[in-house]
Image (cartoon, rainbow, N blue to C red):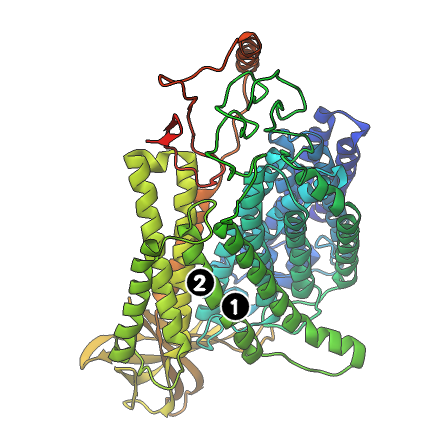
Amino acid sequence: MKCLLGTLALWAGAAGSAVAALAWAGLAGRRTAVAATAAAAGGAAAAFAVLEWALLTRDFQVGFVARNGGRGVPPYYTFTSLWSAVEGSLVLWALVLTGCALVTGLGRDEGPHRRIAMAVLMTLCACFLALVPLAANPFREVAVPPADGPGPNPLLRGHPLMGIHPPLLYLGYLALAVPFALGVASLVAGHAGRPVVRAMRRWTLAAWAALTAGIVLGAWWSYGVLGWGGYWEWDPVENASIVPWFTATASLHSLAVRDRHGSLGPWAAALATAGFPLALLGTFLTRGGAVASVHSFTRSAVGPPLLGILTATLIATCGLLVWRAGRLRRAGEVPGGNGRGTPVGNASGDGHGTPVGNTPGGNGRGTLVGDARGDGRGTLVGDARGDGRGTLVGDARGDGRGTLVGAGVALLVTLAFTVLLGTLYPLVVKVLDGADVSVGPPYFNRVTVPLALALLVLMAVAPLIPPNRARPPLRRLAWPVAAGAATVAALGFGGLGGLGGSGGGHGPLPLVAFGLGAFVLAATALRVREVAGRHGPAAPVRASVRRRLGGSAVHAGVALAAVAVAGSSAYTHDTRGRLEPGDVLRTGGYVLRLDGVERRRDADAMSVAARVSVFEDGRPAGTLRPSITFYPASGAPPVGAPAVRTGPLADLYVTVSEVDPADGTAVLRAAVNPLMALLWASGAVMVLGALAALPRPAARRSRWTRWAQRTRRTRRTRWARQAPSVRTGGTGTPAVTVREDPGGSGVDGRETVGGQVR
């Protein structure tokens, strides 16, 4: 029964997706399209629920349960075993994708772009919902059900993060499908205004937050389960998750610039549409069996269909970029344009090509904006250095902040390309030449570390440059530079003893990373103080200020992560030895004594643990029990479980690789890993900052509100056309108010009256 219900739910979701794609394409009304989208999401949710029902009830008649379930598996890991294999992962993938599509379909309308984007999204949903029953059906019925199953892969049932890490990664991957679809819609339409850009920015930031959380939790899982003492090995599947993260970060900064311009440029469109194909590539590498990885737990027949979907997506996206990028550029670069190809801010323009009489600086609403340098919205922006919304951006002095943001975007794209090149090179060589080659950490460290250090410099300097200035005032850089220099001097002369390492033999790069981290943190603190001081105690309440503070928190989190990575990579102490009961092992100020060997048998596993007493500075510091667990039913190799003692400055990380129960001897490895707590805390800071910076969608206005605003605009227009002369302030000088830019362009909200700032 469950097999039939699950299969029918998948096909119902696929059919609903196909109907929704046609409806959004214009063959039916919006109500029908939304209903079909909800039906597709309901089908995916029903399939997910049926599969979880089969797992929790141990229904071994269902093929997926027979291969991945087990009576001795705890309920939590039984629930999470749905995404421990390809078939269940694709069901979760379809559920998250249809959920994102439903949220997008129910959201605020962005004009014709909404229908095109939803048609693209529902086409993707139909492909994946049809892929599951055709190539990886978890509901295939078993003719002779077994009495018990092997359970999920042993590596996936030893840490509670397996219930959080994969769903977060999937959410990050699939949220990128929305800006991808909106980017495709913008290319098809040939233009995109500010509402579309802001929707893309909002979804990209949400995807970035989920990806960041998933990557950090995945590193934590690797650190706590795999037992090799590290958290990032430049594994192909790890790289497949970090590449979309790089491109999403670049896209966020590019979209922030385009938001101020009010239009989507071809470069921003390319970055927005690159994230989801790279996520598909990561899925192909993880679930298609294309690479050998500690994260590739299963093999299946979904590789060729996934490759087909990826290839079709890449061809369609690249073709659209080549075909329509020129039109998108012309729509956003009309002299004095507002991103829609219409004149704004000229002597009589209203932003929509409607003359407003002979009033200089008219804004199309009859509101006088002071002089001929209007910005198309009735707000004077000071002089020819406008705010990027239909006014001239940059004068002879240049726009240093925009230049540095562009340089940072270029560095992020270069990082993504170099990591992708090193990841795919062995696969390409294997296909073309049949040879087995590998690209290891030395290549990735050599090419990524200099780029990452350059990014830290840009992160610190760019926010300190005032809008439309070529460079920051030297006095604003004095404190950050002093903080970085003092950090390098203190740690260099101090030998880095406080980090648990000797500080020698590692070269200058760790010290450079520490100094740049302090530089970024000091610059971020200066920026936060300026923003908070300008807006007072109510600063966090205002949406635009909250976004700035959230972005500063993200930059601080990146700086903390850079410091933690440098410290944990360069100053780790590592000792290994074979011990008999009573023997001791010394490392990094700790003394470890082997007290004995313990055995334990569970329902479907047997474990052997070494009981180790820890002493720090001669005082007892607790007992650790690193272990090895055997799963006879699964036939998998033994799984080691490290024991970790976490401290504020360093972790004590102990693993056991061999145990001889006859004489009680064990081979122990002990490592002191500095700044690991700081690394996990930096991930939390980045995620919280991203959530704080997440723009809230504008509330839908009621019919009465829309009527009232339209009436007020009509009255202002009539008054402006009948006005005999320009209204002035008390001294005959046009009175102008500069309001804060909601897009974050850096206008500080001070009033300008009579050309003077107060």
Classify 10 Å Cα crowding around label 1: few (below 14), some (14-19), many (20 and above). some
For the residue pair 528 and 379, the one nearer the viewer reads as 379
Q: Is residue 755 above or below residue 328?
A: above
Give x and y (percent) for residue 17: 74, 39
User: 585 left or right of 101?
Assistant: left
For the residue pair 287 and 332, the one nearer the viewer reads as 332
Q: How many marks?
A: 2
**What residue does disc 2 label?**
456
Quarter placement of the N terminus = top right
Give x and y (percent) for residue 726: 49, 15
**What residue does disc 1 label?**
451
For the residue pair 369 and 324, the one nearer the viewer reads as 369
Quarter placement of the C terminus = top left
Q: Is residue 151 above or below residue 578?
A: above
Residue 250 location, quadrant: bottom right
- The amino acid on which the numbered mark 2 sits, given as a three-letter code, is Leu
Identity of the residue drawn at 79% across and 51% down: 319
Identity of the residue drawn at 29% across and 58% down: 479
Q: Earlier in the sequence, mark 2 or mark 1?
A: 1
Mark 2 to mark 1 CA distance (whole Å): 9 Å
Determine the secondary structure under disc 1: helix
Residue 537 location, quadrant: top left
Residue 391 location, quadrant: top right
Q: Is residue 97 above or below residue 724?
A: below
Visible residue check, residue 62: yes
